[in-house]
């Protein structure tokens, strides 16, 4: 029963029982051999915490702000498509859960409901995710719809220009439905069969030729702040600064686009340094414990985003499940920070982290992580 679940792994296990194999595989799976997915957890588990004693931790504060918006916890919901895979209330439930917990949902343009329907259901601030399309008019139209529906930011996904090879989907003959936001464009379903004749869905309208100039054009043609998702190198972080975006999400698409990439937390320090404090840096990928959130914030992330755990919460108990996922992470975060002697988010930094074994330190090498 849902009330007996005490961590996100248990939510996933129950969600797996309730979802069909093809839907579970779509959500949980990644590109080719899924090395990046497995590597990500290994990296988080290899980053050790260095607890400090006799600090006043009678009150732990995890509130923060993103793009000037106050939120109660530094955990947002990622723009993962089609929440209807997990629950019929889909993004309506997710948006209500995020608002109820005092945080932000980033709504996917591939959502099960239209962006307008989700905005009407939302009980807190929401951002809208879109792409750079072959038709520049469509790029502007999607942003304008978000403006009119009271979204507070645009999130542009950069790493979906090429169709990935997701072998679980291929084996399951999985076909993604046409998203509600693109009604009227005669988009077909999206087949994951890996051949050039398979139905391409969104890949028919996303622009594989898009460059930084196209991003410049969008920034100049929307009244909303623009953030980008999919940055994995310091070089691209520096370009983000130069091209006027207000924030970036360090993301490898959950290991779903390209396998054998670094885990996002591995590249986070170089991205933060290259950003020079001129934009906000967020991170997604592999967050399963409150301690993971603390580690990401200690390395310079302003906030993190959840992808797959949102689906596990929805599959188990809809809006209540998503809220419980956020509760679990909140409680684990507060416990971790208190035990490390860090009562506020401003207290978090890389000196509270270490790698490997205490034997390294005993041999005279400094154990804490260094920013590059």
Image (cartoon, rainbow, N blue to C red):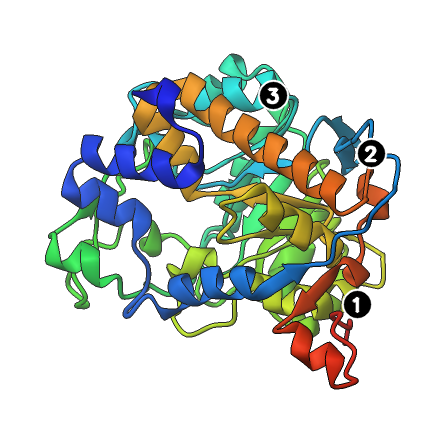
Residue designated by label 2: 57
Horizontal side of residue 242 vs 290, given as left or right: right
Q: In this view, does 315 lie above or below 268?
A: above
Residue for point 81% across, 44% down: 341
Spatial CA distance of label 3 from label 1 is 31 Å
State the image coordinates of residue 272 (x, y, percent, origin top left). 75, 62
Location of mark 1 (residue): 273
Residue 140 makes an appearance in the image: yes
Mark 3 lies on residue: 101
Left or right of residue 307: residue 362: right
Which label's residue is closer to the chain start, 2 or 1? 2
Badge 2 crowding class, 10 Å Cα cut-off, few under 14, some 14 to 19, many 20 or more, is: some
Determine whether, in the image, residue 8 is placed left or right of residue 195. Answer: right
Quadrant in which the C terminus is drawn: bottom right
How far apart, in angstroms, are the residues tagged by discs 3 and 2?
A: 23 Å
Identify the secondary structure beneath mark 2. loop
> For the residue carrying disc 3, how many other residues have a C-alpha within 10 Å: few (<14), some (14-19), or many (20+)?
some
Image coordinates for residue 168, horizontal then vertical, percent:
20, 57
For the N terminus, the image quarter is: top left
- Indicate the secondary structure of the residue bearing disc 1: helix
């Amino acid at each position: 029963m849902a009330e007996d679940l005490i961590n996100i792994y248990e939510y996933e296990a129950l969600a797996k029982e309730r979802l069909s194999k093809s839907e579970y595989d779509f959500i949980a799976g990644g590109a080719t051999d899924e090395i990046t997915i497995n590597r990500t957890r290994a990296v988080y588990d290899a980053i050790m915490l260095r607890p400090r004693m006799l600090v006043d931790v009678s009150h732990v504060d995890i509130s923060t702000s993103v793009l000037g918006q106050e939120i109660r916890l530094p955990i947002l919901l990622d723009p993962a498509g089609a929440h209807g895979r997990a629950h019929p209330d889909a993004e309506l439930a997710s948006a209500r859960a995020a608002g109820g917990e005092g945080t932000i949902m980033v709504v996917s343009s591939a959502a099960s409901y239209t962006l307008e329907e989700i905005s009407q259901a939302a009980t807190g601030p929401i951002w809208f995710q879109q792409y750079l399309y072959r038709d520049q008019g469509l790029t502007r139209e999607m942003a304008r719809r978000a403006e009119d529906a009271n979204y507070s930011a645009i999130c542009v996904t950069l790493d979906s220009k090429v169709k990935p090879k997701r072998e679980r989907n291929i084996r399951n003959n999985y076909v993604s439905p046409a998203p509600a936001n693109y009604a009227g464009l005669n988009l077909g379903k999206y087949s994951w069969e890996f051949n050039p004749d398979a139905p391409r869905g969104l890949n028919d309208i996303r622009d594989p030729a898009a460059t930084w100039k196209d991003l410049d054009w969008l920034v100049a043609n929307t009244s909303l702040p623009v953030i980008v998702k999919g940055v994995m190198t310091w070089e691209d972080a520096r370009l983000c600064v130069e091209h006027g975006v207000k924030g970036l999400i360090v993301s490898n698409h959950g290991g779903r686009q390209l396998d054998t990439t670094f885990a996002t937390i591995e590249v986070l320090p170089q991205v933060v340094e290259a950003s020079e404090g001129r934009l906000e840096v967020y991170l997604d990928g592999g967050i399963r414990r409150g301690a993971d959130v603390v580690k990401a914030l200690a390395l310079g992330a302003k906030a993190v985003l959840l992808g797959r755990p949102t689906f596990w919460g929805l599959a188990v108990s809809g809006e209540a499940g998503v809220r419980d996922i956020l509760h679990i992470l909140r409680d684990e975060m507060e416990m971790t920070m208190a035990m490390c002697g860090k009562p506020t988010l401003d207290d978090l930094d890389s000196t509270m982290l270490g790698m490997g074994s205490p034997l390294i330190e005993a041999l005279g090498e400094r154990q804490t992580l260094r920013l590059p």
